[in-house]
Every structure is written in structure tokens, then in C-alpha cells.
Image (spheres, rainbow, N blue to C red):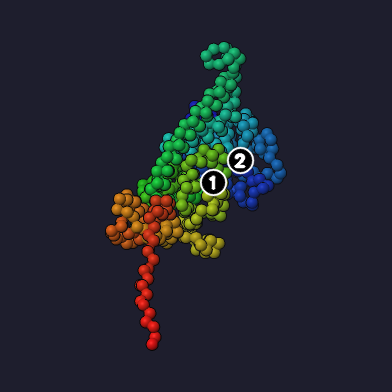
Amino acid sequence: MADFLTDEKVVSRAFLVGVQTPGMEAGEGTELLGELKELVENLRLTVTRTTLVTLRDRQQPKFLIGSGKAAELIAQAKEDGADVIVIDEELSPAQQRNWEEESGLAVIDRQEVILEIFADRAQTREAVLQVALARMEYSLPRLTRAWTHLSRQRGKGAMGGEGETQLEQDRRIVRDRIAHLKEEIATVISQRATQRRKRQRTPVPGVAIVGYTNAGKSSLLNKLTGAQVLAADKLFATLDPTTRQLELPDGRMLLATDTVGFIRRLPHRLVEAFKATLEEVVVADFIIHVLDVANPNVAHHFATTMEVLGELGAAGKPIITVFNKVDAADRQTLALIRAQHPDSLFISVHTGEGLDRLLARCEELTEDNHEAVDLLIPHNRYDVVARLHGAGQVRKQESLAEGVRLTGRFPQKLKPLYDPFRFVAPPPQRKPAGKRVPKA
């Protein structure tokens, strides 16, 4: 992939082209174009113009759209002084090359925009590796964009065999890099699995906070836990999962994890690359699904998140649906969404409205994961007593000659630990019957 942000010519002005295909709902192309504009602005580019093209039938093989329309758009982009044309559809490598040859400008698609944002925001080693892999896999079939002027022959030597072109060498370098990145990611995934097993041995229930990007997930985590996770009003402000302890009003603890935001048309290679990150959703006991109720596309955002949860195999988990930013929504919108989602919660992270009800719902779901038991633990197993005190709610403790009697509610994850010590009350002793005196 040509890194269009670091080319010798500074790219600062973007001309955006949206596409309304026959399979889309009415107005969907316009909505997606508005989202693309926000994505591009997140790359610190100035949008010169946005224009929507309606495809009456199938896509055209050369430019995706008709040649005449492509020429018209190129003329408009040059008139606006644009440096890059951004097309809100996935372009094949050949279509991308055709656009660039015809226009003499950099031409990218929605996938490349999202990849650039992820590359710009990745912080941890895992996120950096995953984004690098996704970019390399994207770039491999597009290397001719960067090397059409270097297709000369090279002689036999250490850099390659006789007749090997510069393009072939670079393809080999990219393939080797992809293989190396996959090995590194496998190591990171193994390390994360080890960390996750350690967390699961500490039987604190877990909740994953998911939702469309910029819905307020990081802000909610900060508000509930006192964390300092970056929370900005922009798409993909945070990419890396963050786990913090959340203390519920009844004193029990939760592990709350903020995950990467979802988005429509997220490049599939990024979904695959971030599987390890999104696995936090799969291992969570339940999910908080955050939506921006003030966003006019909230219905599409709901559908997108549920689709991704289904792909991850997590759609069957208990889900608390939370509509955030009620302080920014009008009454009519709120009334409509309340009617459509009667079991959902409506909150404002900014004002704190509704957070008490959210915590109460978390308590209910955590309660469902606990079992009320009566235990008798031998005096030589105070390690078990200590773990139960740390993980559950001890309602009564009594020291007996046989051991420690504990009554309380404990996570069912700890069932293998406490099951052998269930207290079984001895059967009541019956008084011996007296001798019957015969009647006279």
C-alpha cells in the first residue's frame, strides 16, 4: 500500500465520492458518505467536496462506475485542488490503479482510510502488530502502484535470482514480513491467553463494553471505574482493550473491559486481525452494548454491532442495551426509541443520569452467576476460606469443632473449589420409644 500520508508530496485535500448501489436502502449511500467524511477528517485532511454517485445496475469493471462519470469526477477533483480521491466502496487493485493512471492523483478507498486511522491510533504492541499485518495483506496485490517505474531486471546475486524484477523482490519481502508478523501475533495471543487464564482463576465476573465507535464506551468505563482511558469525540479514539475493576454498590467486584468500536464496512482483514482483542467479548460473563441515542443512524449502528457479536459467537450472552447521550437527544427521538427498545436503559455518561439503574442491572446479572451455598470447610483449608471471602459474599461465618461454617453467595466459576465442602445437616435423631404399658 502506498502510504499516501508520507509521500514526498504532502496530501492535505480530499475529494470524496459516495456510491449508492441498487442493493442499498434509500439514503444509505448519503449516510455512509457522511461517515466517510468524518473518517477522512480524522486523518487531518480537508474535505474539498463530497458527491454521491448512484449505480443503476451492476458495478463497472474498470472504474467501478462508468468511464464518463469517472472523468467528470476527476475534473471536479482537480478543479478543487484535491490531492487524493477517496471512494466509499472497496476498489479492486486494478480499479485503484486505473483511477490513479487516469487522474494522476492518489486514489484510495474506505478500507485504506480505516487502515490508516488504525495505524495512526495503535499504541500497544499487539495493536501495532495487528494493524501492520492488515496493511501488509492489503498492500500485497497493490504493489504495482508503488513500483511501476522499477520493473527493470536485476542480475543474479544475493538480492535474488537472475531475472528477478524489483516488483518480485518487494512481493517476496512483503510475504516474508506477513509470515513474521503472524508469528509475532501468535506469540502475543498466547501471552494474552495466559493472562486471561490467570484472570479466570480469580473468579471475578467480567463484563465487556461494546458498541459502535464514538458511542461513549471509553467515557462510560472512566465514569464507572475512575479510569483515565482516552475518551475523545472522534471515531476510533481508542483501539486497545482496557480492563479495569468496577465495584458494584453491594461491594462485589466486576472486571470491565472497553473494546475497540465497531463500524459499518469494517475491512474484514481488520476483523480477523483484531480477533484476539475481540475475544474479550467472548469470555465475558455479560455484555454492555452502548449506543449513541442522539445519532440519526443509531438503528444501523445497533444492527452492525449485533452482526459482529454474532460473528464472534457472543450474541447469545446476556446483553444490557444502553442508549447513551440522552442529554443530547430530542424528546420525540427518545420516545420512539424507548417504544422500540422497552427493556433497554437510557443514560447520560456526561450528566450521570441512569447510571444507578445500569449498576443495579449489573448487580442482577452478577447475582445470576452466583450460587447460594452452605459450606463446612476443614480447619486445614483456610486457603479456600480466604478465596471465598475475596470472590463472593459471606453472609455468616461460624467456627465449629469440625471446621469453618460459611453461608453466602459465591461465583459458580468457583464451584469445583467449594463443591466438596457443601454442608449436609445430619438427620434429626429420633427419641427412643418408651415401653408400652398393657392396658388392664
In percent of width and height, residue 403 lies at: 30, 56
Give the Cα distance between marks 2 and 1.
24 Å
Residue 393 vs 305, above or below: the answer is below
* Mark 2 or 1, nearer chain start: 2
- Identify the residue at horizontal 49%, vertical 28% (top origin): 180
Count up the numbered dots. Answer: 2
Mark 1 lies on a secondary structure that is loop
Mark 2 lies on a secondary structure that is loop
Which residue of the protein is positioned furthest toward the front in this rendering? 440
Residue 344 vs 225, above or below: the answer is below
Side of 355 relative to 5 (left or right): left
Quadrant position of residue 160: top right
Q: Is residue 420 or residue 186 the one in the foreground?
A: 420
Residue type at mark 1: give it. Answer: Leu
Q: Residues within 10 Å of mark 1 (few under 14, many from 20)?
A: some
Residue 213 appears in the picture as rendered: no
- Identify the residue at horizontal 30%, vertical 50% (top origin): 380
Which residue of the protein is positioned furthest toward the right in this rendering? 57
Q: Is residue 203 or residue 91 the one in the foreground?
A: 203
In percent of width and height, residue 320 lies at: 48, 57
Q: Kindly report which numbered mark, 2 or 1, lies closer to the viewer in this rendering.
A: 1
Residue type at mark 2: give it. Answer: Glu
Q: Which residue is mark 1?
A: 312
In percent of width and height, residue 167 lies at: 58, 22
Q: Residues within 10 Å of mark 2 (few under 14, many from 20)?
A: some
Side of 356 relative to 111 (left or right): left
- Identify the residue at horizontal 54%, vertical 53% (top origin): 316
- Report the disc number at residue 89: 2
Q: Would you say the residues marked 2 and 1 are in contact, meaning their CB atoms lie under 8 Å apart?
A: no
